[in-house]
């Protein structure tokens, strides 16, 4: 090969010499004013050829140089990655042995060698948080997100840092920034964002997030759960609007909730309250009566009773109770509710007669016997009054006229959302008696804060469609 190249070079030199012999003409060039330069034409040709060859060689040389630099960097990166992998392995080993200080030291060394090692930054930040160094955890997790903003683990870790540090607004801003992005649709992150908004009662924002979240699932149990939470948030949005006296907007929110779940009692009760505040009392009565006819839930009769007494229309609720009892004459919960209404209206004889007929039919709580004893006292029957008070003192006595179907907590007032288990649509009127627990009582159709919209299998004695 070398001999061939030498032969080519020799022939090229011979050819150039011959060119000089064949082309004796010269060319005058003036590179600078007043300095002409005379060159043979062949010299000009050779110079042009040499410059072109030199330019080509320079281009190829630069390419080779760049490839060499790139290969050198790749080799260096590979060595760094191997070193980082070895350190990362040691970190895991130390953590498995519960040697946290040693693992912490190795992690700090790792992130100094490999600053964009997001796994190490994430773990180091979590350890810092567990040790109470919240500012350090925030700094590390923010640094990790610079290298990978789409990693939801980093987002969740930083959000938890903010939460632990009491920086709730920063936490919400972080979730909000993610939510507004086109790719910000990870259902777990949206669920955490929704929960934070609910905890801070930011119902308008929670509704926006939950609307997206409820559409993120195909038909099935999970979608039903998310839709149930959506119904609850719509109710809370309407409730907040009602507190601001924006009755028009609140009615729309309550109707929107009922459109999804017609059996969601809090929205129907909220709608009736909005109508009542607008002076549309007849429509409010009709709304509650429709709910009672549909679901046979005593809570509607309870709300109707309050509204009727507030507006001075006791005949309307008395008539409705009469029709309800005629349709289900053996429902103890309904009969007891009617007796309490008689007592509120000072119809002592009617109340006492009904209470006496109910005594012994159920395992009544102390409140029942307290009312019975009070009625006897008003009739000057001290002997029976004392006996009733004695039974009430020895019987079960739990404070609260209302109760949650799911967690069984007793409440003094009605609420659309149970303050104990945070589930919507589970608070209703307690029947006044206790009964043995059944397997159905151990389950509930509510998920998290939501209402499934399905008939609740528990406490069938509360429903006027069931006799006890």
Image (cartoon, rainbow, N blue to C red):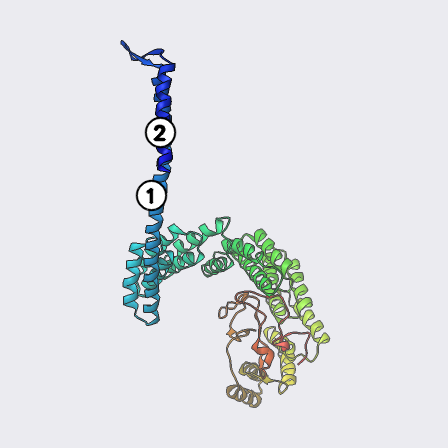
Residue 406 sits in quarter: bottom right
Q: Nearer the viewer, residue 373 or 199?
A: 199
Mark 2 burial class by Cα count in 10 Å: few <14, some 14-19, many 20+ = few
**Residue 188 to residue 326: above or below:** above
Q: Does residue 137 appear left or right of residue 298 in this picture? A: left
Q: Nearer the viewer, residue 311 or 162?
A: 162
From the image, which quarter does the C terminus lie in? bottom right
At 31% from the left and 61% from the top, the residue drawn is 107
On residue 9, which mark appears?
Answer: 2
Residue 315 sits in quarter: bottom right
Q: Position of residue 403 (x, y in %)?
A: 54, 74
**Counting residues from the N terminus, which is met first, the one under dot 1 or under dot 2?**
2
Residue 44 visible, this orientation? no
Mark 1 burial class by Cα count in 10 Å: few <14, some 14-19, many 20+ = few
**Residue 407 to residue 277: above or below:** below
How many marks are shown on the rendered structure?
2
Q: Position of residue 227 (x, y in %)?
A: 59, 60
- The residue labelled by disc 1 is 69
From the image, which quarter does the N terminus lie in? top left
**Residue 72 to residue 123: above or below:** above
**SS of the residue under disc 2:** helix
Q: Position of residue 381 (x, y in %)?
A: 58, 87
Residue 35 visible, this orientation? yes
Q: Nearer the viewer, residue 251 or 437?
A: 437
**SS of the residue under disc 1:** helix
Distance of label 1 from label 2 (alpha carbons): 33 Å
On residue 235, which mark appears?
Answer: none
């Amino acid at each position: 090969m070398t001999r061939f190249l030498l032969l080519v070079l020799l022939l090229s030199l011979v050819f150039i010499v011959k060119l000089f012999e064949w082309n004796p003409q010269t060319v005058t060039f003036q590179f600078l004013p007043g300095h002409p330069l005379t060159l043979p034409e062949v010299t000009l040709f050779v110079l042009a050829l040499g410059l072109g060859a030199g330019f080509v060689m320079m281009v190829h040389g630069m390419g080779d140089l760049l490839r060499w630099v790139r290969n050198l960097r790749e080799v260096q990166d590979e060595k760094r990655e191997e070193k980082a992998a070895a350190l990362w392995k040691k970190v895991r080993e130390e953590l498995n042995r519960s040697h946290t200080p040693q693992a912490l030291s190795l992690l700090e060394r790792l992130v100094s060698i490999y600053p964009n090692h997001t796994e190490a930054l994430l773990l180091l930040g979590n350890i810092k948080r567990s040790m109470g160094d919240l500012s350090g955890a925030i700094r590390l997790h923010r640094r990790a997100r610079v290298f990978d903003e789409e990693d939801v683990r980093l987002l969740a870790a930083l959000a938890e840092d903010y939460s632990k540090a009491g920086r709730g607004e920063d936490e919400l801003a972080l979730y909000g920034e993610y939510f507004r992005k086109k790719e910000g649709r990870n259902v777990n992150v949206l669920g955490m964002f929704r929960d934070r908004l609910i905890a801070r009662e930011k119902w308008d924002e929670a509704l926006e997030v939950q609307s997206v979240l409820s559409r993120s699932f195909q038909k099935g149990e999970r979608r039903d759960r998310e839709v149930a939470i959506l119904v609850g948030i719509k109710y809370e949005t309407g409730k907040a609007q009602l507190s601001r006296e924006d009755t028009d907007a609140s009615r729309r929110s309550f109707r929107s909730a009922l459109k999804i779940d017609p059996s969601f009692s809090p929205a129907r009760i909220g709608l009736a309250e909005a109508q009542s505040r607008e002076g549309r009392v007849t429509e409010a009565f009709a709304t509650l009566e429709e709910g009672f006819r549909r679901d046979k839930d005593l809570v509607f009769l309870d709300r109707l009773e309050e509204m009727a007494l507030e507006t001075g229309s006791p005949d309307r609720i008395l008539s409705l109770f009469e029709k309800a009892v005629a349709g289900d004459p053996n429902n103890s919960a309904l009969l007891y509710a009617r007796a309490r209404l008689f007592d509120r209206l000072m119809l002592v004889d009617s109340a006492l007669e009904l209470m006496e007929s109910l005594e012994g039919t159920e395992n009544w709580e102390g409140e029942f016997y307290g009312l019975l004893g009070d009625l006897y006292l008003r009739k000057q029957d001290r002997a029976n009054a004392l006996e009733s008070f004695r039974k009430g003192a020895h019987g079960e006595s739990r404070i609260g006229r209302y109760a949650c179907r799911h967690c069984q907590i007793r409440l003094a007032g009605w609420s659309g959302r149970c303050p104990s288990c945070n589930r919507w649509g589970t608070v209703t009127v307690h029947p006044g008696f206790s009964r043995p627990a059944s397997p159905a009582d151990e389950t509930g159709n509510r998920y998290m804060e939501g209402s499934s919209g399905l008939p609740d299998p528990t406490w069938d004695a509360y429903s006027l469609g069931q006799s006890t």
